[in-house]
Every structure is written in structure tokens, then in C-alpha cells.
Image (spheres, rainbow, N blue to C red):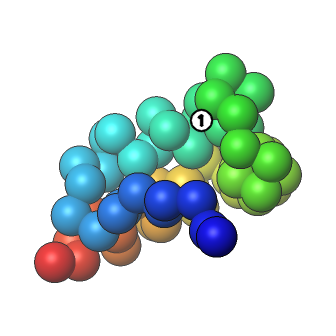
Amino acid sequence: MMAAIPRLNGQHAAYLVKQLDDFATGKRQGMTMNSIATTLTDAQKEAVAEYLSGRP
């Protein structure tokens, strides 16, 4: 059975960027997200956050 996955659509962009930063630094743990977040530039994190925050 899959673990619950939080809904990201509609979250505030600043919150999403903070979470990506926390995954990138290891402050927040999630094997897949840690490895993905470390590859993103600040501009890419902002772009992902803006996209997700604008989704219903």
C-alpha cells in the first residue's frame, strides 16, 4: 500500500520553496525528494513553486 502523498496544488509558493530547501539540506527527510531537491537551482525551485501554487 502506498503512503499518503500530500497535495501540493494550491499551496503558497513561499511554503513550497521552503520545503524544497529543507529537502535539499536534509532538514526534512524523504529519500526521493531529498535526491530531487538537491539537483534543483533556486530558480527551478521558484518555478516549480509558482506552477504548483497556481494549480487548483
- For the view shown, which residue lies furthest in the top direction? 27
How far across and how far down the image is residue 13, in percent? Answer: 30, 51
Quadrant location of the C terminus?
bottom left
Give the camera-side residue of 41 and 28. Answer: 28
- For the view shown, which residue lies furthest in the bottom direction? 56
Q: What residue appears at the point 64 percent right and 29 percent down from the top-left corner?
A: 28
Q: Quadrant of residue 7?
A: bottom left
Q: What residue appears at the point 80 percent right and 48 percent down from the top-left corner?
A: 31
Q: What residue appears at the point 23 percent right and 77 percent down from the top-left corner?
A: 55
- For the view shown, which residue lies furthest in the left direction? 56
How far across and how far down the image is residue 46, in percent? Answer: 46, 55
Would residue 42 appear left or right of 38 to someone viewing this image? left
Q: What residue appears at the point 36 percent right and 62 percent down from the top-left corner?
A: 8
- The vertical placement of 18 against 13, above or below, is above
Give the camera-side residue of 46 and 23. Answer: 23
Amino acid on which the number 1 mark rests in the picture: Asp
Task: Name the residue carrying label 1.
Answer: 21
- The vertical placement of 52 against 42, above or below, is below
How far across and how far down the image is residue 22, in percent? Answer: 60, 30
